[in-house]
Amino acid sequence: MNYSYDKYLLNQKSKELEKLTDEKKAYSKPKREQIAYKFSERGKGTLYESIILSTNPYFITYDKEKDIIISIPNIVESTRIIRPPFQEECPFEPYEFEDIDELNSYLERAKNETIDSLYQKIKIIVKKYNDRDNYTINLLSADILL
């Protein structure tokens, strides 16, 4: 009787161990890879935009503390890896830059602009392509800016 009870316990322990092993295998599945053009944790986190940086895809984001644009190759979450698309995978023309310094130079240029300077630049372009009165040109320019 003791022998069959020991056999029963051994069988139960074996089943529990097998179940734990299966759970561990399920938990340690490789993370699935997903392509994203933009990512922001459902609008609650930092915004990342995909770009092509010297022929390689990266996500970029603005670091407020360091006041620079940083690039990362992918975003790793608990169940997936989010990566930017390669140029061939983009259904549109991707943003392309030679290096991170070029990106930061655009950041410096943007810091020197004001809403008024942007409005004046937009208005010049709108005037080139629209033969309208000044009131309509002002409305079109403001609509583009805002």
Image: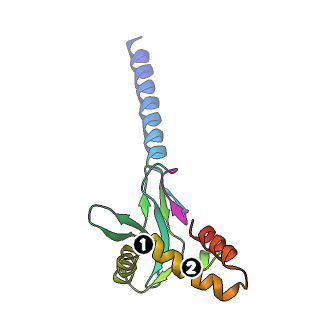
Q: Nearer the viewer, residue 128 or 40?
A: 128
> Regarding mark 1 in the picture, which secondary structure is present there?
loop
In the image, residue 27 sits, relative to residue 144, either above or below, namely above
State the CA–CA distance, disc 1 to disc 2: 12 Å
Image disc number at residue 68: none
User: Which residue type does callout 1 highlight?
Assistant: Thr
Q: Nearer the viewer, residue 36 or 65?
A: 65
Extreme-right residue of the structure: 131
User: Which residue type does callout 2 highlight?
Assistant: Ile
Would you name the residue on which mark 1 appears? 114
**Is the C terminus in the top left, top right, bottom left or bottom right quadrant?**
bottom right
Q: Nearer the viewer, residue 95 or 57?
A: 95
Magenta region includes residue 34:
no
Image spot of residue 57 (x, y percent): 47, 75
Image spot of residue 30 (x, y percent): 47, 55
* Identity of the residue drawn at 65% across and 70% down: 139
Magenta region includes residue 36:
yes
* Identity of the residue drawn at 40% across and 66% down: 61
Q: Which residues are magenta?
A: 35-43
**Mark 1 or 2, nearer chain start:** 1
* Identity of the residue drawn at 65% across and 88% down: 128
Image disc number at residue 122: 2
In the image, residue 61 sits, relative to residue 112, either above or below, namely above
| Residue 103 in which image quadrant | bottom left
Display colour scheme? rainbow
Q: Nearer the viewer, residue 57 or 131?
A: 131
> Regarding mark 2 in the picture, which secondary structure is present there?
helix
